[in-house]
Amino acid sequence: MSKRIFIFDTTLRDGEQSPGISLNIQEKLQIAKQLAKLKVDVIEAGFPVASKGDFEGVKAIAQQVDGPVIAGLARAVKQDIDRAWEALQYSARPRIHTFIATSDIHLKYKLKMTRDQVLETVIEMVKYARNLCPEVEFSAEDASRTDREFLYRVFEEAIKAGANVINVPDTVGYATPEEFGRLIRSIMENVTNIDKAVVSVHCHNDLGLAVANSLAAMENGAQQLECTINGLGERAGNAALEEIVMAINTRKDWYKYSTGIETRQLYRTSTMVSSLTGVSVQPNKAIVGSNAFAHESGIHQHGVLSNSSTYEIMTPESIGLKQSQMVLGKHSGRHAFEERLKELGFTLTKEEINEAFVKFKDLADKKKVVLDQDIEALVSEKMTKIPEMYELLYFHISSGNQMVSTATIRLKRDEEIIEEASVGDGPVDATFKAIERGVGMDITLVDYNLKAVTSGKDALGEVVVKIKNNGEVFLGKGLSMDILEASAKAYVNAINKMIYAKGLEHQ
Ligand code: KIV
Ligand code: ZN
């Protein structure tokens, strides 16, 4: 019998802490619902005390997402724990995840506390959290650089105080697999009441060892692995969920463990997270990269065609990457389109399917063959609905290498039509400046990214922009066969998201 490993997903907390990522409530909910479909055991939904947006996100997920345990992060202070509970109380399976640093470096330079003071805080705060919530996880931040004897004491006292899960983070990604495995073994052997708690690990990827460290920990007694989709997270990120899960699945002969993950949802989850965060997946990324199942060399192609096991250790289907048998084009009907949406893992309402079908027909008129990536891009563009204060009605741009670029735009705000024009350093700059004038806001563009959704001259262009306002970043997307239209749409979309987030739409 294989031992069951619990998968704790922290994409919405540690992943969302990555620079430049900021998701609104609708987007967080969409990801959380997909994580529930993926059947993760725990969703860490956010850090409620960190901001109003974080609090509302955790609350909405606690209210609307069933299945997994819903966790919220809190420092080991009452105010954080109260706020976490305020958001989590609606869940059928809430968990407060409280933490404090335990390494001497953190005690001296960050907390300015003695070991005794930290120990007292752990006992007091774990008890406090347990009085509110039936499940409490305690993390010893920077555990891998903490004095061993002190770490054993901290965990022993946390368990006595009521922690159901104790977590061993390699916060700075410093550990190596054998060393980290031994650390977990030593915790199993030296913390006298360890049988009363689940042991968890949380590995960062600064040395590219997060997945290897997590697997080594599992082989030495850890039963919960904390990870993120696409390995998102602070700095170099966290252990990648898809890599951990597929390593356990593919190497059943070696790892005598299992997870409850529905692996055929991995690809869909990865593309959703990438699309909503704006963080693209590197092509050669294990499991979900666009080249992960592509065979370029003739020898490999020949081998795979004779028998896929020659060069494929897992099938694309096992992660939900279907090889489409049917090509969609302008003669395809609604039924075929709906079937393809289902195959791609989208669960849409009738109204959303209708809307997507209109866009599909529109694209199929311009493009001979509509590929899965086109459909994914079309549908994802409108999946998270937010009230859109501004709509782009029209644009006209003139540009060339011997002239000053100018742009005219027309926007609709309620019943009002706004027209503006501007010059700029190139057509995109001119367009963005005209839009800024139209909405009457000073906006800082921090990132602009253009990619072709598929190959070929008739490919859809997808533009992702990030704008900044008061230190907060907002992401906007635009899709079109015309890259200037895609740029303008992306800019307007980012502005609408910013207005939505700031609650300005009622002013
Ligand atoms: O990396 C870390 O130590 C953390 C803790 C809060 C678990 O994210
Ligand atoms: Zn972390």
Image (cartoon, rainbow, N blue to C red):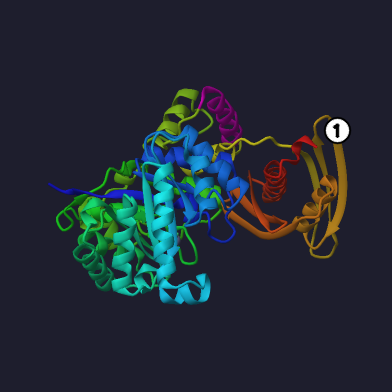
Q: How many marks?
A: 1
* 107 part of magenta stretch: no
Please give the residue where the numbered disc 1 appears in the rendered image: 416
Q: Residue at x 24, y 63 (%)?
A: 191
Circle 1 Cα neighbour tier, 10 Å, few/some/many (<14 / 14–19 / ≥20): few
In which quarter of the view is residue 304 placed? bottom left
Q: Determine the secondary structure under disc 1.
A: strand
Q: Main secondary structure of the magenta part?
A: helix
Q: Position of residue 505 (x, y in %)?
A: 75, 37
Q: Is residue 227 at least partly visible in the picture?
A: yes
Q: Is mark 1 within 8 Å of ligand 1?
A: no
**Image-based side of 405 in relation to 382, left or right:** right
**Image-based side of 400 in relation to 53, left or right:** right
Q: Is residue 27 above or below residue 195?
A: above
Q: Residue at x 69, y 59 (%)?
A: 471
Q: Position of residue 207 (x, y in %)?
A: 39, 72
**Which span of residues is magenta-colored?**
349-365
Ligand 2 found in image quarter = bottom left
Q: Residue at x 24, y 54 (%)?
A: 248
Q: Position of residue 103 (x, y in %)?
A: 40, 72
Q: Farthest residue to the left: give it.
A: 1
Q: Is residue 293 at least partly visible in the picture?
A: no
Q: Is residue 255 above or below residue 490?
A: below
Q: Amino acid at mark 1?
A: Glu
